[in-house]
Amino acid sequence: MTTERRVLGAGICLVLIYALQFLAARVSLAGNITPSGLTILRFYAAGALFIPYLCLAKTRQDIVRLGLVKIVTLSVLAGFPYLLVINTGISLTSAGYVASVGPGSIVLFSFLLPLFLLAGKADSVSVVSTMLITTGILLFIYNTFLVKGLSPAGTALFVLQGLMFSLYGVLIKRWQVGAIPGTAAVSLASCLPAFIAHASTRTGFAAAPVMELLFQAFTQGILAGAAAILLYTYIVRQIGPQRASLLMPSVPIITTVAGHLLLNEPLGIVQIAGLTFMALGMSIPGLTAIHRQHLRSNKGPPMAE
């Protein structure tokens, strides 16, 4: 199998994992499992998956080198509290909302935070992208007042999710944390609040079928918690971050359409318009970077006089 086919296959699997994560979460959250319970399942499974990595000396050294303060900070921003915010938001809105507003907010804050925290500079492409995404988010918020069963609070939680994960991204870059050590540290550290939440909050586990619990643990913890990260890392290494980023706009589109067809989630003109704005906003930076790279590669050496 050629590299191109492997990358294509990895990209299809990645998009399907993200869509399945949101759709499966919505189904269980509309039933017996609570947002806390779904988050607990996620980190029970992810924690069990990453325990063997502690047997590797290099992984232990990378985690210890991070230190307690950094591990706790990263775990708050991308661990148990982060997933609890997402799952609570899904319970108040829909799978299409989390798949659209969540990634859109991440892109939005990934543009804004470096400007304030890292003294970055804004280019015209990023400004246009941010304006489109912001318009899309505002349309989604407006849509919550038009459609019964959609809560503005749920949309606000997805915006908070975007802020949290963007801060996580900034700190990962500043602290030079690797993908696997960082994910392992967050997953393992999040097991502690998962144990506490299991003992102190309602989970809905008793009323849910065993197969549903196992399916959610596999989907949320193994597929979304580990496999998706490894697939995305592979894709970025093969084709670069710009081309890899073009996969992301397909996630809200597929999830929203599937949510409407399979789960009977509402899908109106305002939501479609918001989805279009956000998909365009997420696509523009990657397409522009690829175009610039193509122009540079086709530019021949300067002619001798």
Image: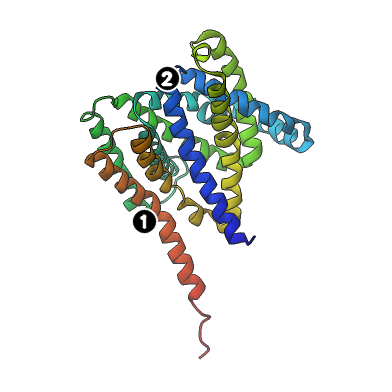
Does residue 285 appear left or right of residue 205 in this picture?
Answer: left
Q: In x, y percent, where is residue 263? A: 37, 32
- Which part of the image, by quadrant, shows the N terminus? bottom right
- CA–CA distance in space, label 2 to label 1: 43 Å
Does residue 5 appear left or right of residue 266 in this picture?
Answer: right
Where on the picture, by quarter, is residue 192? Answer: top right
- Residue 13: mark in rendering: none
Which residue is depicted at the point 47% across and 30% down?
Answer: 24
| Residue underneath mark 1 | 125
Q: Residue furthest left?
A: 146
Question: Which one is nearer the viewer's eye here, 52 or 300?
Answer: 52
Location of residue 303 with respect to 65 vertically, above or below: below
Q: Residue furthest bottom?
A: 305
Badge 1: how crowded within 10 Å, few (<14), some, or many (20+)?
Answer: some
Question: Which one is nearer the viewer's eye here, 252 or 120?
Answer: 252
Does residue 245 appear left or right of residue 55 in this picture?
Answer: left
Q: In x, y percent, where is residue 288? A: 41, 60
Which residue is depicted at the point 79% across and 35% down?
Answer: 57
- Residue 31: mark in rendering: 2
- The residue tagged with tag 1: helix, strand or loop? helix
- The residue tagged with tag 2: helix, strand or loop? loop
Amino acid type at image mark 1 = Val
Which residue is depicted at the point 30% across and 39% down?
Answer: 137
The answer to which of marks 2 and 1 sits earlier in the sequence is 2
